Image (cartoon, helix red, strand yellow):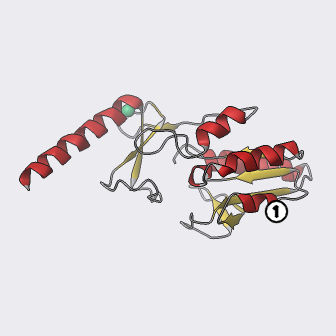
């Protein structure tokens, strides 16, 4: 979320553009946080993208592309894996950015399978807001258990493993305390 995944995606796609390759970027249609047509990263460097309701649609729209970028891939369902494999088999270079773990620290949607079939995997890291160590986890501040709580910056914090575990334990303690009041 704060790790620069989208910035890295944009950087790679811009390099492909400079090399005069045909580039298309897709993202799940549900991610309408900023602009519908742009992949916008947190530091506001943006690049035009096409929102699609289902992964299958990428196959229809990406015909003839040298490079296919996919952002927020964790919000697609498992069918994205087969779509990416087909694109790669057709000869496209496929670059996928997404969160590897959800707010419970569990593998997120199609990401683990995508990492398995990818030739290369780059993990970019945020900085823990509590202690400054390298952060791999997204700690959710709000109590909602909904997996898709679109990330306004105050809804999540980047945390390292120990600070994530501390936070989860704190939440569990608070929940027990409040359930005893009923
Ligand atoms: Zn920490």
Q: Is residue 59 left or right of residue 129?
A: right
Q: Is residue 66 visible to the viewer in this orientation of the structure? A: yes
Residue 113 versus residue 139: which sits nearer the camera? 113
Read off the residue under disc 1: 60
Residue 63 versus residue 141: which sits nearer the camera? 63
Q: Is residue 161 left or right of residue 68?
A: left
Q: Residue at x 65, y 46 (%)?
A: 97
Instruction: Report the image quarter containing ligand 1.
Output: top left
Q: Residue at x 66, y 40 (%)?
A: 114
Q: Residue furthest left?
A: 181
Q: Residue furthest bottom?
A: 36
Q: Position of residue 51 (x, y in %)?
A: 67, 66
Q: Position of residue 7 (x, y in %)?
A: 65, 49
The relative height of residue 177 versus residue 48 in the rendered view (above or below) is: above
Q: Is residue 93 visible to the viewer in this orientation of the structure? A: no
Residue at disc 1, CB closer than 8 Å to ligand 1: no
Residue 1 versus residue 61: which sits nearer the camera? 61
Q: Residue at x 23, y 41 (%)?
A: 172
Q: Is residue 95 left or right of residue 139?
A: right
- At mark 1, the secondary structure is helix
Sort mark 1 into few (<14), some (14-19) or many (20+) by Cα contacts within 10 Å: few
Q: Position of residue 118 (x, y in %)?
A: 73, 35
Say which quarter of the image contains residue 37.
Answer: bottom right
Q: Position of residue 152 (x, y in %)?
A: 45, 60
- Looking at the figure, which quarter contains the C terminus? bottom left
Q: Residue at x 73, y 46 (%)?
A: 82
Number of labelled discs? 1
The relative height of residue 65 versus residue 85 in the rendered view (above or below) is: below
């Amino acid at each position: 979320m704060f790790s620069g995944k989208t910035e890295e995606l944009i950087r790679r796609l811009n390099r492909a553009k400079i090399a005069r390759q045909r580039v298309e970027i897709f993202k799940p249609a549900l991610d309408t946080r900023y602009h519908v047509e742009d992949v916008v990263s947190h530091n506001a460097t943006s690049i035009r993208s096409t929102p699609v309701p289902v992964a299958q649609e990428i196959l229809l729209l990406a015909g003839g592309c040298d490079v296919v970028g996919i952002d927020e891939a964790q919000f697609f369902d498992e069918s994205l894996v087969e779509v990416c494999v087909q694109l790669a088999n057709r000869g496209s270079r496929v670059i996928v950015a997404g969160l590897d773990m959800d707010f419970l620290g569990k593998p997120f949607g199609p990401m683990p399978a995508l990492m398995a079939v990818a030739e290369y995997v780059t993990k970019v890291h945020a900085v823990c807001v509590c202690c400054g160590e390298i952060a791999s986890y997204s700690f959710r501040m709000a109590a909602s258990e909904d997996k898709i709580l679109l990330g306004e910056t105050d809804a999540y914090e980047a945390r390292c493993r120990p600070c994530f575990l501390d936070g989860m334990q704190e939440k569990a303690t608070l929940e027990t305390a409040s359930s005893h009041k009923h």
